[in-house]
Amino acid sequence: TPNLDIRDLQVSIEDKQILKGVNLSVNGGEIHAIMGPNGTGKSTLASALMGHPKYEVTGGSVTIDGEDLLEMEVDERARAGLFLAMQYPSEVSGVTNSDFLRSAINAKRGEGNEISLMKFIREMDKQMDVLEMDESFATRYLNEGFSGGEKKRNEILQMMMLKPRFSILDEIDSGLDIDALKIVAAGVNEMRSPERGVIIITHYQRLLNYIKPDFVHVFMQGRIVKSGGPELAERLEQEGYDWVKEELGIVD
Ligand code: ADP
Ligand code: MG
Ligand code: MG
């Protein structure tokens, strides 16, 4: 089964250490939620895994199906099956949503194995239905003029089309109203399969009412400090993070 294994990962930005030994192993079929206070390094973890050049790995290892992820270029990581949906997706002028998606899919499939236009359209129609997206989205420019909620939905559409083995959803719930939240959750749930693992980074428990995680991790001071099941998310929602700090003797 697919496996993403993060061991003692240490990452610095501009010589400041942000990640201080992250340990996390995700298997196919599993959904892991990472919750934690702002500014503790959750997005840094996501960016470092994707290979953002600003984030310097200073220690530890990451493997995807046994292969060294940290040795891979950004596009190789995507081909190896890693996908990141971001808090603030960027706009791309002059490229339509469907063109972008089709070239992303074909980049992943490789030369000589391109998806047929018919099959692509059928698949895109199907997934846009799940996400209750208007047909016009296919021909609009990528993220241009999209509302916050539309951008998030579009990121989930990309995920559903690319079928990555490991998806990282970084605060995909921020700024979504409850209806959009449910639709986004439906998309993620539709993707659930033994072939795929998901990491959901979220500040709030409410998304986890609609996507049941198998594991919940508390992220503080640049590492995972506590892990448990869904009940951990509920306790964090009710009691905040102070009890975790007390329990672990964390001073900040
Ligand atoms: P979280 O996602 O948990 O809110 P981040 O990973 O965004 O936390 O940020 C962790 C720390 O790293 C913060 O102190 C933040 O200011 C710093 N940081 C993150 N990204 C950058 C960057 N591109 N340049 C400089 N500092 C950064
Ligand atoms: Mg933040
Ligand atoms: Mg963040």
Image (cartoon, rainbow, N blue to C red):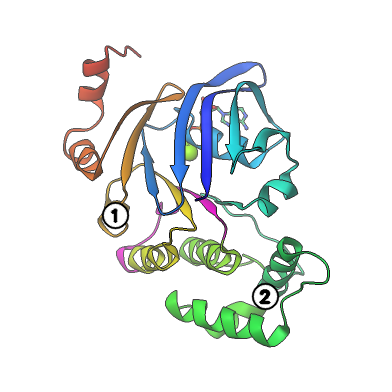
Crowd rating for badge 1 (residues with CA inside 10 Å; few <14, some 14–19, many 20+): some
User: Which image quarter: residue 193?
Assistant: bottom left
Residue 230 position, x and y percent, is 24, 45
Q: Is residue 93 magenta?
A: no
Q: Give 104 or 236, whichever is nearer the viewer.
A: 104
* Residue found at x 62% / y 53%: 81
Label 2 vs label 1, nearer the camera: 1
Q: Is residue 167 magenta?
A: yes
Residue 98's place in the image compared with 18, above or below, is below
Residue at which label 1 appears: 212
* Residue found at x 50% / y 76%: 127
**Badge 1 amino acid:** Lys
Secondary structure category for the residue under label 1: loop
Residue 209's place in the image compared with 245, above or below, is below
Residue at which label 2 appears: 98
Residue 242's place in the image compared with 169, above or below, is above
Point out the tag, 2 or 1, that comes first from the N-terminus.
2
Q: Which residues are magenta?
A: 164-179
User: Which image quarter: residue 97?
Assistant: bottom right
**Badge 2 amino acid:** Ser
Residue 148's place in the image compared with 55, above or below, is below
In the displayed structure image, the side of residue 116 where residue 155 appears, left or right: left
What is the CA distance from the residue labelled 2 to the residue labelled 1?
Answer: 30 Å
User: Which image quarter: residue 243?
Assistant: top left
Residue 205 position, x and y percent, is 28, 47
